[in-house]
Image (cartoon, rainbow, N blue to C red):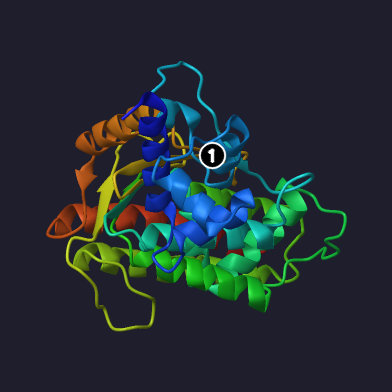
Amino acid sequence: MNENSGIQERLFQSVKSRLAPNISFVHDLSELLGISYDSAYRRIRGQKDLTLEELKLICTHYCISMDEILNFQSDNVSFNTMSIGKGGFTFESWLNTLLVEMNNIYDCRNREIIYAAKDIPIFYYFEFPEIAAFKFFFWHKILIPNADYKIDHLILEAPEDLFETGRKLLRCYMRIPVMEIWSEHTISSVLRQIEYCLESGFFGQREDAVRLCNVLDLWLDHVQSQAEHGFQYMLGRPPEGIENSYKLFQNEVLVNDNTILVNANGHKTAYLTYNIINQLITNHPAFCLQIEDSLKNLMQKSTMISGTSAKERYRFFNSLHEKVKLLRQKTERTD
């Protein structure tokens, strides 16, 4: 086998690992390159070399790092970006893109997610419509101002189509083996955002801020229950799932960033969050390995509070409930 054939074989193996089982690789490739099925087969079998333009098109379309395919060692790391705002995604299209990626991960035979959560993982926003509505308002009004967003006061009702997309995302996330790393600061961000909106007069009714605190308490109880069972399940449903598919770690110092590492059929992808919600995404092998090593080191320096660690789990969630209680008390004061 010549060197070019080896490169093409690695490329097509990488593409196949990313495709959902119901997608025909030959059909997908012929559509992408604008060639016949026979021409696509000859490229897949290594009988015809890809042109540089075809190689570029395939890597761009399937989000594959050229360094990964060429086995090229470089300090340069290429990222794709998923950003909301001017020149980027709308929040709705951002959610739909994330849902497609999450479904692709779920369709892989071997998959795992490691999530270092500086803030509440975004999937959980859709556990309650109140939290989804609050986040939707905060992002459009404060974080990424949108001139087309005309709502001046917060209403705790999420747009139905957006909330349903988020629920699909949550359901998919809950079916994938997950390891999450939290600290006592994981809930601090949303509490600060609620307090900011309260002090800025964005709540139509002061009682809505109290309502959000109550919802956060319910959500924390549910996560604690998931950690106790060792698997995730939808709120309001009977607790059913695969044992040890959900592992929750408490880091006593600080989780510095929202960082996600996905292992899917032997391929690693790193998601780095910037500007609160936007993401940088890379498949660069060396970089992803560094991220994986860093996250595993963080887990080693953390305490696993899922499964049988009842005492540590109770203490941790009690401390988070206490933070919510302090904000609720501040919110309820009328002076």
Q: Quadrant of residue 221?
A: bottom left
304 relative to 267 in the view: left or right: left
10 relative to 158 in the view: left or right: left
Residue 284 appears in the picture as rendered: yes
Task: Please state which of residues 75 and 27 is positioned toward the viewer in this rendering.
Answer: 27
Expressed as whole percent of the image width and height from the top left, the position of residue 208 reads 64, 71
Outermost residue on the left side: it is 308
Quadrant that contains the N terminus: top left
- Residue 17 position (above or below residue 204): above
Residue 198 appears in the picture as rendered: no
Tag count: 1
14 relative to 210 in the view: left or right: left
Disc 1 is placed on an element classified as helix
Circle 1 Cα neighbour tier, 10 Å, few/some/many (<14 / 14–19 / ≥20)? some
- Residue 114 position (above or below residue 289): below
Expressed as whole percent of the image width and height from the top left, the position of residue 299 reads 25, 39
Quadrant that contains the C terminus: bottom right
Residue at image position (26%, 55%) is 110
Residue at image position (82%, 53%) is 146
328 relative to 178 in the view: left or right: right
Expressed as whole percent of the image width and height from the top left, the position of residue 172 reads 41, 67
Residue at image position (39%, 57%) is 105
Expressed as whole percent of the image width and height from the top left, the position of residue 333 reads 61, 62
Residue at image position (32%, 61%) is 176
- Residue 138 position (above or below residue 300): below
Task: Please state which of residues 155 and 60 is positioned toward the viewer in this rendering.
Answer: 60
Q: Quadrant of residue 53?
A: top right
Residue type highlighted by circle 1:
Cys
Task: Please state which of residues 267 and 305 is positioned toward the viewer in this rendering.
Answer: 267
Task: Please state which of residues 266 and 161 is positioned toward the viewer in this rendering.
Answer: 266
Residue annotated with mark 1: 59
